[in-house]
Amino acid sequence: MPGDKRPRITADEEARMAELETQLFRGEEDVAAELLSTGDPQQLPVYQDCEPTEEARAPAWHDPQDASLRVNVADVSRARKLRQRNGEKTAALLQRSGGLLVKGRALPAGQLEASRMRDANAADPAQGVLRALQYHPNGQLLLTASLDKRLRFFAVDGDACPLVQSLFLEDLPVHAAAFAAGGRKVLATGRRKYFYVADLESATVERIPRLFGTQDRSLEGFVASAGPGSQVVAFLGDDGTLPLMSLATRQLVGTLKMNGSARSGAFSSDGMELYTSGGDGAVYIWDLRQRSCRARFVDEGSLRGTSLALSPDDSLLAAGSSSGVVNVYGREQILGDSSDPVLPTSAAAADVAAAFPRDAARPPPRHSALNLTTTIDSLAFSPDGQVLAMASRMKRDALRLLHVPSGTVFSNWPTSRSPLGYVHCLDFSPGGGSLAIGNAKGRVVLYRLHHYPQA
C-alpha cells in the first residue's frame, strides 16, 4: 500500500515463522496421529506421569524462574475452565482416533444404549421361519438359514448388508446351521438322516447321505466346534447319544452317552471340552481327548435343559431350561476339585448316575435370571462376556439382556415397541457392537449397541 513503511517479510523469515507456528501450535490432526502411533492406550502421553525422555520434544524456550513457580489450578477459576475444555477436547480426539479409550471398558448396569438399524437380511429376507443365524469369525459375513431350504450369506458392511450367496437345498428344510472349522465350512441339518456340508474355500456343497454307525433318523440338533484347529461336530440324539463326527473325513470318530435326551450343547473355545444338557436337567462336561465324562451337575431349578452357552474365555457357563430360568455358573463352581471322578465313555447310562450322584453335584449359580417364563431356546454371550442374550420362541418379544457382572437385566431395552416378534435365533457380532435377531417372519432384526466402538 502507498505510504506503508512497515518492513517487508522475506521468504526465509516467512518459512521460519511457519516452522515455529507448527512446533508451538500443532493442529488436532497432529495430536490424533501421535495418539494413534502410541498403540497401547495405557502408554498414551496424557496418562504418563514421568520425566520426559531424551527423545521427547525439546521446549521452545526455557525460563529459570519456572522452577520456583507454583500454581494451584484448583484455586484459579479460569485455569479450571481451561483444564476442563482441554480434557473434553482430548477425549473427543481419542474417540475420533479409533476409540482407544472405550476398547475393553466396563459396561455399566441398568441402562443400555441401543438403536435399531436396517434389517441385516433386507436384501433377501427368508420366506420361512429363520431357524439359525451366525456371524463369521472375521465379522465380514452373516449366515442365515430357514425353513425355505436356503442358506444365505450377507456381507456385513455398515448399514447395508448385500447378499453375497444363496444356496438352495432342495430336499432339506434347514432347522440348524453353523460355521465350523474356523469358519471355513458350514454345516446344515434338518429332520432328516442326511445333512449338507458347504466348503467356503472350494465353493462346493456336499450331501452326506447318512452318518454310519448311528441309528438316529433325525440329525437336526448339533453343535460344532468353532476353533480353527478343530473339525469335530457333536450331534444331539434323542436317546442321549452324542455321535462325534470329523468334518475332515465325514466319519464317526466316537460316541458319548448321557442320561435322558440330549437337547443342547456347547464347545469350549479350544474344542477340547463339550458341555451338554437335556431331559434329566443335568449338565455334562466331556473331555474329548479322553472321550470321558469329566463332571456332571444338576442345573438349579431345571427339569429339562434346553440351551447352553459358554463365555468366550470359558470362565462362565449359561444354562437355560424349559421353565424359563437361566443360570450363570463360574467354571470353578461346576468343576470343583480336580480330583473329581472321570467316567469312561464306554460306561452305561446307569453308571453315569452312579459316578455322579444327583445329590453330590448341585452347585449354586452365580446369577439366576427369572425374567422369562417359557422355554429358553437361545443363549449367547457378547464377545467380552459382559452381556448375555437370552430368548424364547414360545412368546412374542421374549428376549432379555443380562448384565453379567451385576447379574441384573437391562431395564430400558428391549421396550414394548421393539419389533422383535417370535425370536428363534440370535448372535453378537465379533466386535460386540451389533446384535442380530432372527424371528418367525424370516427377518434379521439388527440393533447397534453403542457401548462397543466396533460394530
Image (spheres, rainbow, N blue to C red):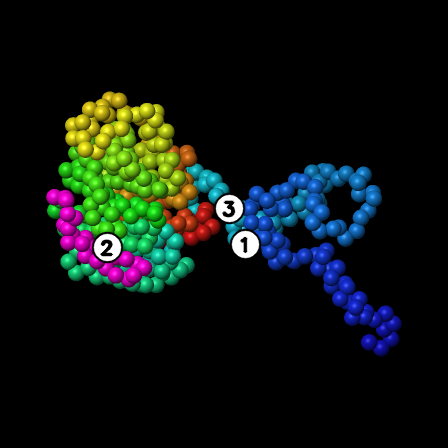
At x 60%, y 56%, the residue is: 33
Residue type of the residue flagged with mark 3 = Val
The answer to whether residue 394 of the structure is visible from this angle is no
Q: CA distance from mark 3 to mark 2?
A: 39 Å
Q: Quadrant of residue 291?
A: top left
Query: Foreground mark, 1 or 2?
Result: 2
Sequence order check, earlier mark of 1 and 2: 1
Image mark for residue 102: 3
Q: Secondary structure at mark 3?
A: loop
Q: From what the image shows, is residue 374 above or below residue 295?
A: below
- Residue pointed to by mark 1: 96
Sequence order check, earlier mark of 3 and 2: 3
Q: Secondary structure at mark 2?
A: strand
Query: Foreground mark, 3 or 2?
Result: 2
Q: CA distance from mark 3 to mark 1?
A: 11 Å
Viewed as shown, does residue 305 lie left or right of 112?
A: left
Q: From what the image shows, is residue 217 above or below residue 283?
A: below
Q: Quadrant of residue 306?
A: top left
Residue type of the residue flagged with mark 1 = Arg
At x 15%, y 54%, the residue is: 209
The answer to whether residue 31 of the structure is visible from this angle is yes
Q: CA distance from mark 1 to mark 2?
A: 43 Å
Q: Are marks 3 and 1 in contact (CB under 8 Å)?
A: no
Q: Range of the magenta residues?
A: 193-215
Residue type of the residue flagged with mark 2 = Val
Viewed as shown, does residue 243 lie left or right of 333?
A: left
- Residue pointed to by mark 2: 197
In-front residue for pair 86/147? 147
Q: Are marks 1 and 2 in contact (CB under 8 Å)?
A: no
Residue lying furthest bottom in this view? 2
Mark 1 Cα within 10 Å, few/some/many (few <14, many 20+)?
few
